[in-house]
Image (cartoon, grey):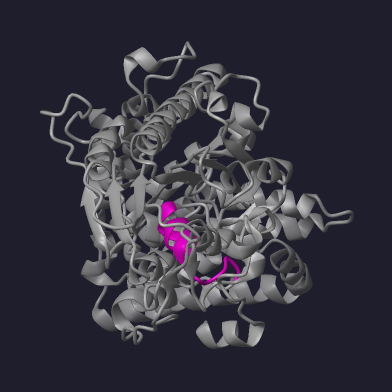
Amino acid sequence: MNKFMNFFNNRQLTTNQLLLLTCSYLALILNLPFLIRTSMAITALDNYNIFFLISLPFFLLGLTLLLQGLIAFRWLTKPILILTVSVSALIFYATITYGIVFDYGMVQNTLETDTAEAFSYLNIYAIGFFIIFGALPSWIIYSTKLTYQPFFKELLSRLKLISSSILLVFIIAAIFYSNYASVGRNNREVTKYIVPYAMIDASYKFVRNHYFYPPLKFKLLDTAPSIVRDNNKKHVTVMVLGETARAMNFSLNGYEKPTNQYTEKQGVVSFSNVTSCGTATAISVPCMFSRLSKDNYNKRIAIAQQNVVDIIHLAGADVLWISNNNGSCKGVCTRVKNTQIATDKSNPLCDGEYCYDEALLAPLRAKLNNLSHENTLIVLHMIGSHGPTYYKRYPKDKRVFTPDCQRSDIQNCSQEELLNTYDNTIAYTDFVLSKVITEMSVLTAKESIETSVLYVSDHGESLGEKGVYLHGLPYTFAPDEQTHIPMIYWADNQQTDVNLNCLNQMSDTPLSHDNIFDTLLSIMSIRSKAYINDNDSFINCKSLSVMTRPPPINQHSMEILN
């Protein structure tokens, strides 16, 4: 070891030599996910040029040298190279371990992640990986002695390196332009794997959009929404916002394990063909409550106009958002009453960082015992099945499926253990959801209050399928595991607003987060000009009088609103 250290301590390199070695490491090692995926796209072609395939790593090396050569000079060389290698090593780990791609959405999700969630990814495997691929190369860069020429000779030498890089890139591009253009056009997603430049580009766009663009003027989609009901009964709806639940692991949807043994006895309707707006909470949550659709969703626009919670509140309903998700409500609950479950260890359901979702039941019960309005909407934001520490999402007495994976480096668990752990989170979510339904049933029986419960998850999760874990992949090539989500509805047996038998018959109808805005207005019987008939999931199963309450809005009006 001492000989190894002395070798680098005594080694002298020019800045260009250090750049060449470091950029070779960046391009050929830390960019292996990009090289592998692009090579697979090339070799999948019916007739591909072998020399085109061979040119790929040289083309990437030329680009890396060009970019690093422009920003690393003299005393800046080592700090910039160390920072680049360290960041690249972290991305390299996330990509090859979990299949994560650091595009715009993932950068947003990362920056909005709380400390407890960030530390959940920390484990011995991650530390060891970073030491080998990040810390050790960074130490070598730091320990290497650099020899400098006079300023103008150093500048000339750098210009030669940059010119050589440009020439290499130009020659390869000139010879194989049509090949690169074709593969790039048909496989745009592969560029998101270029380390670390794809993340740098996404980070720049995120910072620009959130901190340098002036805020938009807040837009009112409806200034006078109203509640219209056929009876004088009080009404309470609880919307349970799930976290990281995928529809395929719900036995209500045909999954072989009994993950819904509680709610299946309570007469719920499970919609089995629902897709999410995004693959991460930072996008899906504000998107599903927004008037904007998945195809035209833009967070900057969404936060600058009323969401469905705002409209329900403005109509005269009491709205309360209760969160057990440390990721917050992503701006949705800013203008209504909201509360965060304290994670203090004095609560037996909490460990100081997280709480089990049963912690939502106490504030729910307190609210139900003190209703102040005729109409009430309560949103319960779960922590649900958030990974990678799935085993922390359910208490020990709710370990239904064993053996489970009691660690955060989930890629090192067997597939059986990982699936059992995740299925335990779904079974526990079902248990908590059944408790919510029970509370609502008791309320109806005791005070003749109309009640209903709507559960929907924000996005799904990958559990090692095709080597991908967790969530957050760009939607264009995200697997169904990350976009196919559960949606469940329950209503008390006294309500006549919605025909549950009718809902059961249409439970396999294709739906998405785009339907949530109008479905919530429909459940709450809100008349609003922001309502769209065709987007209401329940419209075909509602009584005629209810169906005609909220006037439909035409496409021209929608263009004005958006």
**Can residue 99 be seen at all in this image of the molecule?**
yes
Residue 118 in percent (x, y) is at: 29, 43
The answer to whether residue 28 is magenta is no
Residue 193 in percent (x, y) is at: 54, 55
The quarter holding residue 271 reads: top right
**Can residue 196 be seen at all in this image of the molecule?**
no
- Residue found farthest to the right: 46
Q: Is residue 197 above or below residue 193?
A: below
Residue 117 in percent (x, y) is at: 30, 42
Label the magenta part by its dominant secondary structure.
Answer: helix
Residue 5 in percent (x, y) is at: 25, 36
Q: Which of 200 and 179 is in front in this view?
A: 200
Seen in the image, is 250 located left or right of residue 431? right
The answer to whether residue 293 is magenta is yes
Seen in the image, is 517 located left or right of residue 347? right
Q: Which residue is drawn at 36% across and 36% down?
A: 132
Q: Which residue is drawn at 43% across and 44% down?
A: 451
Q: Which of 350 and 542 is in front in this view?
A: 542
The quarter holding residue 218 reads: bottom left
The quarter holding residue 555 reads: bottom right
Q: Is residue 459 above or below residue 350?
A: below
Q: Which residue is drawn at 63% across and 57% down?
A: 543
Q: Which region is colored magenta? A: 281-295
Q: Residue at x 57, y 19 (%)?
A: 258
Q: Nearer the viewer, residue 180 or 350?
A: 350
Seen in the image, is 215 located left or right of residue 510? left
Seen in the image, is 247 located left or right of residue 5? right
Position of the N terminus, as image quadrant, is: top left
